[in-house]
Amino acid sequence: MTIATTDSGSSSSSQNSNSRFDSLISQLKGNKITKDRLRTEVFNVLLDDAVESPSVGNYYIFEYDPKFKDKLIEWDEYPLIFFLEGKGSNVIGANLHYISSNARLSAINSKKFPKNTLRQYIPKNADSIFFEIRESEVQLLSLLPLEKFHRKN
C-alpha cells in the first residue's frame, strides 16, 4: 500500500486561500492517507467541473487507460495535463507528472513544458470524463501525489 502525506506548504508560490480544497487539505494535513483515497477525495471535489470535451488552454486530470499500453514503456494512469491542442478527436497535453515536483511550478507559471511531457490522449480511453482544474488550484494539485505510473518490467 502506498501512503501519501499532505502538506499545503507555506511558500509564496502556494495557492490562494479560500480554494475549494482548503477544507480537504485541513482535514488531511498531518494524516497518512493512501494515494488512492487522496485521488478519490480530489476527484470528488472536482466532480462539478467534469467535462466531456476539454478545451485548449485549460488544465485537467482524469483516469486514463491507454489503447496501446502493452507497447508503452511507461504511462500515467492519472495524468494532470495542460491541454495544448487537439489532433483530430485526440487531446495533446503536457503531463505535469513527468516534470520533477521542484520544476512543476516554474513550468506552470511560464506555460513552457518540456518535450518529454507531451502526450496524446484518446478521450474515450478517459471514459470521456475530464476533471477541469481551475487556474488558481493548479499549483496545489500539481504538488499532490496524484500520479500512478505503470512501467514495463
Image: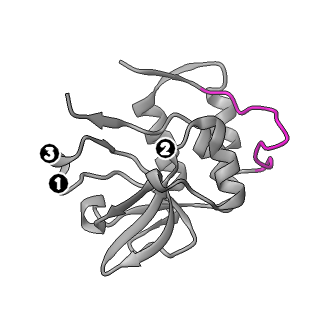
Dot 2 falls on a residue whose secondary structure is helix
Q: Which residue is mark 2?
A: 97
Pick the front one: 139 or 107: 107
Q: Which residue is mark 1?
A: 68
- Image point 48% across, 48% down: which residue? 44
Up/down of 39 relative to 2, above or below = below
Q: Tell me the amino acid under the disc marked 3.
A: Asp
Q: Outermost residue toward the bottom?
A: 88
The reply to whether residue 20 is visible in this rendering is no
Q: Which residue is mark 3?
A: 70
* Image position of 6 (left or right of 52): right
Asked if residue 16 is among those painted magenta in the image, a careful observer would answer yes
* Dominant secondary-structure state across the stretch colored magenta: loop
Q: Tell me the amino acid under the disc marked 1.
A: Phe
Q: Sequence-wise, which precedes: disc 3 or disc 2? A: 3
Q: Sequence-wise, which precedes: disc 1 or disc 2? A: 1
* Image position of 27 (left or right of 84): right
Dot 1 falls on a residue whose secondary structure is loop
Asked if residue 14 is among those painted magenta in the image, a careful observer would answer yes
Give residue 141's quadrant in the image: top right
| Residue range highlighted in magenta | 6-18
Q: Tell me the amino acid under the disc marked 2.
A: His
Q: Position of residue 76 (x, y in %)?
A: 35, 44
Q: Position of residue 74 (x, y in %)?
A: 29, 40
Instruction: Give the Cα separation between the discs numbered 3 and 1.
Output: 5 Å
Up/down of 96 relative to 128, above or below = above
The reply to whether discs 3 and 1 touch (Cβ–Cβ < 8 Å) is yes
Crowding around mark 1 (Cα neighbors within 10 Å: few <14, some 14 to 19, many 20+) is few
